[in-house]
């Protein structure tokens, strides 16, 4: 309830019979001058190929597979009116003030006719000429003559700092309506292949194979490409015509100079123009700038200031009223020197207004980029500074490039030599702070930020090398600018500018020591790489971001990074824990985030080197166990070794995996399994690899394996006892257990071998039995033989290896560790002859009988708690044990 509008129940004595208090109405002009709450983060959702991308400027962009109901409709082509409107919006802004008459195209009639004729035949042409030769002016005239040649009209594109892929996307969006939709490569090629237009491409910066790929992707388009001689030429087998553009002849240069001045030239001016033509090789730009010098000289001779104290609003001297061929009368001012005519930027700038000179200083600080005229009043601090762009255009110091303006060819070098680099850092800092405020304003759309991308990125590039660790209560201007502009570039589909801003921001954050901002930029770079199909780069960037955010305990950012990393693993077809079947795989790239995880390195397969060299199954560092370590489809045990080549089945082999895991089928990672971020460092030894591998596996997989092993052990024990029990108390094994029962380390998963006569730990003498000839013996986990115990032998009419249960199974203990030369591995079930021998006296007197060698049929291995096969040896029918010498000679 509002405390100022209390009702009858408010308890106030003055509320009865009085109307509620009314607040004074707000003035619409001052409605926005009050205090405002913090603006909400501008989040934009767009579709990139098969992904739904949510641009989140706070915690980092989120990416997921696009649901079917969020898929945009098929792109539709624009109408002729819509294309014209889009072309007007993409054109450079018109400066304020009276309209300026365009200079005629002189001396280019032959090139003009040839270009139009080739384009009408559907041929692509490359126009090559030096900077300042009038290429852009010629393109404008040819484009106007070819407006009706193609069904999709004429499309104007700029190749300045653009790649072939960027130009394909620009061409698609110029012809189709697809807001907030960036097509994947295959879908993009399908749409641009159907575009039939005359594409006028200016300031291209690539050639060769990249240009051939651009032409092959658009077979229905005719290209008119303008380039400088330093740009790589097309390939030799490309079907593109070459047209070279040279300078004007002397007569054409003088004629152009007269049009620029607005009158006929005097004899001295004509002679000066002839020397200028020889020095400049006839470049039209030099004659236009020379005409601006002569106009300034005429104003000075007339004694009339061209500018007043406020700027450029003082009317100029009407030169058309003067006597033709004669300059205005007044003070005699000499003509500029030949050097000043060849490099006129410094002289022209000295005669401009203060706002125009300040604009030139900002342009030098930004590497030649001219800020939009709407930004000039805020940058310079003059409300009329937007008129400075008209001055610069009139002097030919700037030229249009795409949708904005840059310093004309050679002007930047001339201004730097004239001292315009003084205090350049302060101008770059002012531009960066202004663009940071402007790009983050809620009223500024992402499309407007993308249109100003070149100036924003130029300010960012100028600040990054100067970035240092700021004070405690300050932030780095470069980091702030990149942090604000990057999401706008992403939302406006300017992904080339997005990538440049992210890389510059990551470098600035590193220099400034801003770990959280550095994590954000790495996360965004991973998202960008994932959208572009670069999975290895995406994994490296995301792992680096997760590691940095984990160090900062940034839970929300870490969750966003792990979700994106899980999508990368899903797209790449690999899992963090396992590789492809067979144990072969390629280790991912080592990214900036390597070594930032808390997990230990995974194990190496026996015989495999840390780097995955030949000699064993390949194991990805930090990615857990290889597929072959858990047993492949062929049933090969861990490490790919045979079942008859190891030590006891319960013994873990050095550098391999525990025997308890060898008998289980290969694990398959479910779709919803949690992702593990593991240390990518290589294991230094077998035991370290073994411990790291166990920790690298998912915990629930270990729990499931342990539960399964325990269940198998219990079931096997119950079935064995039930099958061997004959309800005889005398023969009951529980009644024959002595004071030192058998110790089955490893779950009793190995077949008892022939025991040697020795003293048990309790002082008893163990009985001797025969063991299989080519089977491995059991051992404890530390590699030593388990203690021997006493067990009375029982006669057996059925071989122990028989699949049928024996009424009186023999009970034996594990034997000592075999000699070092014996093979290692799991025992194989082969026919095993038994030997007869006398051993130590048995606990009960039993007549000695001779057992002839018998062969036991193959018996499948039995899974026990240790996960290894158990083989039972045939016992002797006689009660007398074999001698120690005979038991020791058993192979």
Image (cartoon, rainbow, N blue to C red):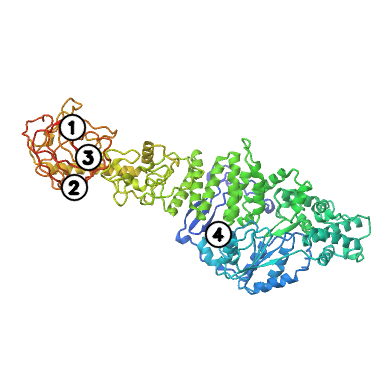
The image quadrant of residue 286 is: bottom right
Q: Residues within 10 Å of mark 1 (few under 14, many from 20)?
A: many
Q: Which residue is mark 2?
A: 859
Q: Which residue is mark 1?
A: 756
Mark 2 or mark 4: whose residue is earlier in sequence: 4
Residue 147 placement, left or right of 272:
left
Q: Is residue 37 visible from the viewing direction of this image?
A: no
Residue 48 placement, left or right of 877:
right
Mark 3 or mark 2: whose residue is earlier in sequence: 3
Which dot, 1 or 3, sits closer to the camera?
1
Q: Which residue is mark 4?
A: 180
Residue 342 placement, left or right of 471:
right
Q: Which residue is mark 3?
A: 750
Mark 3 to mark 2: distance in Å? Answer: 13 Å
Residue in front for this viewpoint, 159 or 567: 159
Residue 577 percent coordinates (x, y): 39, 46
Residue in front for this viewpoint, 68 or 801: 801
Residue 86 percent coordinates (x, y): 64, 65
Q: Residues within 10 Å of mark 4 (few under 14, many from 20)?
A: some
Tell me whether circle 1 and circle 2 mark residues in contact (CB < 8 Å): no
């Amino acid at each position: 309830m509002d405390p100022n509008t209390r009702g009858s129940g408010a308890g106030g004595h003055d509320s009865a019979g009085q109307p509620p208090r009314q607040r004074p109405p707000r003035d619409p002009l001052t409605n926005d001058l009050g205090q405002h709450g913090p603006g909400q983060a501008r989040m934009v959702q767009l579709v990139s190929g098969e992904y739904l991308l949510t641009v989140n400027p706070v915690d980092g962009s989120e990416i997921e597979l696009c649901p079917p109901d969020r898929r945009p409709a098929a792109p539709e082509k624009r109408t002729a009116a819509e294309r014209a409107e889009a072309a007007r919006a993409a054109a450079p802004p018109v400066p304020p003030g009276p309209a300026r008459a365009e200079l005629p195209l002189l001396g280019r009639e032959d090139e003009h006719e040839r270009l139009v004729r080739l384009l009408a035949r559907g041929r692509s042409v490359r126009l090559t000429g030096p900077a300042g030769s009038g290429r852009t002016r010629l393109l404008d005239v040819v484009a106007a003559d070819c407006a009706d040649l193609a069904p999709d009209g004429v499309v104007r594109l700029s190749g300045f700092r653009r790649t072939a892929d960027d130009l394909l996307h620009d061409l698609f969006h110029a012809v189709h309506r697809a807001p907030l939709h960036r097509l994947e490569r295959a879908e993009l090629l399908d749409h641009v292949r159907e575009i039939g237009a005359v594409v006028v491409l200016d300031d291209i910066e690539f050639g060769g194979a990249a240009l051939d790929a651009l032409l092959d992707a658009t077979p229905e388009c005719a290209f008119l490409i303008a380039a400088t001689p330093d740009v790589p030429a097309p390939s030799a087998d490309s079907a593109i015509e070459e047209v070279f553009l040279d300078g004007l002849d002397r007569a054409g240069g003088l004629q152009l100079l007269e049009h620029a001045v607005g009158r006929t030239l005097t004899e001295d001016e004509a002679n000066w123009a002839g020397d200028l033509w020889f020095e400049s090789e006839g470049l039209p730009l030099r004659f236009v700038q020379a005409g601006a010098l002569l106009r300034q000289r005429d104003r000075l001779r007339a004694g009339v200031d061209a500018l007043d104290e406020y700027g450029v609003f003082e009317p100029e001297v009407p030169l058309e009223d003067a006597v033709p061929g004669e300059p205005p009368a007044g003070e005699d001012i000499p003509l500029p020197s030949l050097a000043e005519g060849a490099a006129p930027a410094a002289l022209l700038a000295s005669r401009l207004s203060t706002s125009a000179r300040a604009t030139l200083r900002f342009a030098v600080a930004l590497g030649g980029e001219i800020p939009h005229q709407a930004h000039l009043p805020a940058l310079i601090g003059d409300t009329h500074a937007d008129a400075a762009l008209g001055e610069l255009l009139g002097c030919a110091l700037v030229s249009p490039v795409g949708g904005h303006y840059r310093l004309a060819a050679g002007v930047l070098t001339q201004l730097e030599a004239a001292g315009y680099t003084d205090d350049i850092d302060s101008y770059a800092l002012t531009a960066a702070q202004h663009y940071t405020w402007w790009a983050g304003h809620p009223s500024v759309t992402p499309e407007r930020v993308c249109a100003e991308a070149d100036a924003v990125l130029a300010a960012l590039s100028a600040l990054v090398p100067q970035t240092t660790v700021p004070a405690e209560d300050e932030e780095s201007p470069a980091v702030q600018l990149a942090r604000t502009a990057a999401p706008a570039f992403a939302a406006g589909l300017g992904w080339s500018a997005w990538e440049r801003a992210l890389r510059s921001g990551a470098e600035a954050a590193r220099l400034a020591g801003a770990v959280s901002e550095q994590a954000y930029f790495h996360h965004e770079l991973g998202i960008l790489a994932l959208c572009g199909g670069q999975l290895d780069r995406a994994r490296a960037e995301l792992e680096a971001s997760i590691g940095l955010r984990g160090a900062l305990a940034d839970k929300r950012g870490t969750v966003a990074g792990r979700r994106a990393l899980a999508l990368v693993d899903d797209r790449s077809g690999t899992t963090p824990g396992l590789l492809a079947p067979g144990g072969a795989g390629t280790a991912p790239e080592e990214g900036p985030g390597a070594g930032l995880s808390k997990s230990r390195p995974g194990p190496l397969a026996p015989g495999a080197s840390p780097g995955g060299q030949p000699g064993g199954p390949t194991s990805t560092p930090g990615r857990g166990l290889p597929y072959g370590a858990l047993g492949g489809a062929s049933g090969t045990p861990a490490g790919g070794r045979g079942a008859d080549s190891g030590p006891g089945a319960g013994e873990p082999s050095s550098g391999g995996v525990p025997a308890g895991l060898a008998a289980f089928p290969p694990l398959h990672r479910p779709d919803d399994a949690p992702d593990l971020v593991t240390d990518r460092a290589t294991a230094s030894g077998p035991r370290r690899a073994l411990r790291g591998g166990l920790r690298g596996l998912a915990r629930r997989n270990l729990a499931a394996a342990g539960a399964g092993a325990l269940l198998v052990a219990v079931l096997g024990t119950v079935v064995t006892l039930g099958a061997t029990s004959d309800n005889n108390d005398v023969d009951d094994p529980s009644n024959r257990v002595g004071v030192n029962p058998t110790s089955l380390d490893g779950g009793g998963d190995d077949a008892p071998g022939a025991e040697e006569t020795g003293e048990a730990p309790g002082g008893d003498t163990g009985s001797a039995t025969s063991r299989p000839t080519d089977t491995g013996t059991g051992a404890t986990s530390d590699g030593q033989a388990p203690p021997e115990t006493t067990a009375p032998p029982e006669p057996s009419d059925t071989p122990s290896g028989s699949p049928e249960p024996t009424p009186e199974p023999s009970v034996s203990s594990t034997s000592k560790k075999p000699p070092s030369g014996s093979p290692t591995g799991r025992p194989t079930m082969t026919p095993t002859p038994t030997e007869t021998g006398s051993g130590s006296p048995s606990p009960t007197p039993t007549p000695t009988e001779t057992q002839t060698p018998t062969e036991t049929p193959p018996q499948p291995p039995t899974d026990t708690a240790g996960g290894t096969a158990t083989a039972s040896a045939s016992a002797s029918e006689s009660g007398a044990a074999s001698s120690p010498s005979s038991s020791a000679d058993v192979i």
